Image (cartoon, coloured by chain):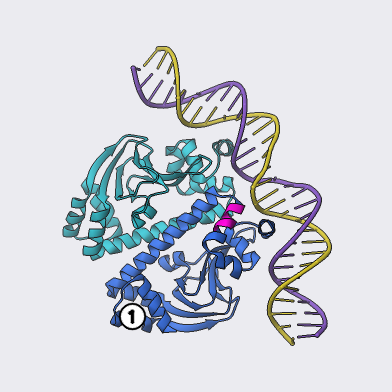
Chain colours: A cyan, B blue, C yellow, D purple
Amino acid sequence: MHDNFKIFLKYFIDFNEEELGKIAACFKPRSVKKNDVLLAQGEVCNKFYYISRGCIRTAFITKEGHEKTRYVMCEPSIGTALTSFISQKPSFEFIDTLEDTELLVISYEDFYKLNAEMINWKVFYQRILEMAYSFQNKKIEGLVTLSAKQRYELVLKETPFLVQRLSNKILASYIDVSQETLSRLKSR
Amino acid sequence: MHDNFKIFLKYFIDFNEEELGKIAACFKPRSVKKNDVLLAQGEVCNKFYYISRGCIRTAFITKEGHEKTRYVMCEPSIGTALTSFISQKPSFEFIDTLEDTELLVISYEDFYKLNAEMINWKVFYQRILEMAYSFQNKKIEGLVTLSAKQRYELVLKETPFLVQRLSNKILASYIDVSQETLSRLKSR
DNA sequence: ACCGGACATTGACATAGATCAAAAAACGCT
DNA sequence: AGCGTTTTTTGATCTATGTCAATGTCCGGT
């Protein structure tokens, strides 16, 4: 499990073996069933995840009780409820699993210890933040410039595995469209 | 001009005098008139700005020809078209000035030189990215959960100076609502 | 293998907010 | 200061997408 993790890390940054060992030692394995809540709304997020198998998401619930999916992570991937993780304040978004999932988990403390001690980890985290920012930016562009249909087609084109892997309900909330509308979009 | 800049920097990170000197030396002053385009759509963004007086924004134009304002920076503030700056690819968003503006400008090369050479600059940039991410996140939440009126009221509550300082046209495009709708919202 | 609850589909209807248009007000250039 | 351009306001429509409801389908637990 840690082997794939190391390969994944090296894809981002050319960590040396010593660094990889130090990093891997901070990440503890964890298995979770589908529909498990890793972080509840209102909790402070003090974990950062590597997904080695399966699928998790960040999402939130509106005042009207509607679920909105912000981000979906399928293996191999990393992430967390970043806003709360950064600020160490209660999270508006929750994290749950969309499939049975194998994780590697690092605590906030260890994450920031690495950040303080290892230059390359800073570089790694910087890259993650840059990617996260760019992703959000694209999402905003989509919300603001595209119709429901165009947003669906964009996901179909750019991340088709999400269309295959997610239930319509989750996919709809990811695209920000009602289930009914998504159903109609798909049948054309 | 650089004095206020140093105070601004120290608000984020406790740079020492030597570091502040090194940083300030990289930033060149520039004056721009209102409605000047600092970065055109399609150009690669290789500048990062400190706004010492005035107001600039990042924005983009949709296929239908509508202008959408992503982010507004009023003095004292920093920023750029981050996605293009990060990737050094052509920018979808442009940058223009909303008022006569005094800037301090650092090039991409110098920015990344600082990033490579000065640990505290890494920390600074990390903080900027974290803030930028969190801002985008909030923006998405607003777009997805709030009505036009609620988005207007949120801006009125959280950044009232924008309501005062921006034209209705710009403000409308920032809130993601048509000018006409904003006009009606205001008159209630 | 069966049952119950969640999910998906389809239809009818409602509505926020866009669009179009035209008048009124404000702004900035000479 | 005055005129033309740009903004703002107001009114009348239009439309994409949400909501509600009813039926059909799937899936997981016993």
Q: Which residues are magenta?
A: B149-154
Q: Quadrant of the C terminus of chain A?
A: top right
Residue shown at 31% from the left, 69% from the top: B122
Q: Amino acid at mark 1?
A: Leu
**Could you tell me residue A109's position as x and y percent?**
24, 55
Q: Quadrant of the N terminus of chain A?
A: top left
B188 to the left or right of B85: right
Up/down of B66 relative to A147, above or below:
below
Which residue appears at 39% of the width and 78% of the height? B7
Q: Relative to A152, is B118 above or below? A: below
Q: Position of residue D1 (x, y in %)?
A: 80, 85
Q: Nearer the viewer, residue B79 or C25?
A: C25
Q: Relative to the observer, which residue lies in front, B112 or A187? A: B112
Number of numbered discs overlaid on the protein picture: 1
| Crowding near the residue tagged with mark 1, few <14, some 14–19, many ≥20 C-alpha atoms within 10 Å | some
Quadrant for residue A179, please give it. top right
Tag 1's secondary structure?
Answer: helix
Residue B132 versus residue A24: which sits nearer the camera? B132
Residue hosting label 1: B20
What secondary structure is the magenta-colored segment mainly? helix
Residue at screen point 58% across, 46% down: A148
Rendered view: A26 above or below B179: above
Residue B109 shows up from this direction: no
* A94 drawn magenta: no
Which chain letter matches label 1?
B
**Residue plotted at (26% across, 56% down):** A111
In the rendering, at what x and y percent does residue A154 appear? 52, 49
Is any atom of residue B102 visible in this view?
Answer: yes
- Residue B69 position, x and y percent, is 57, 63
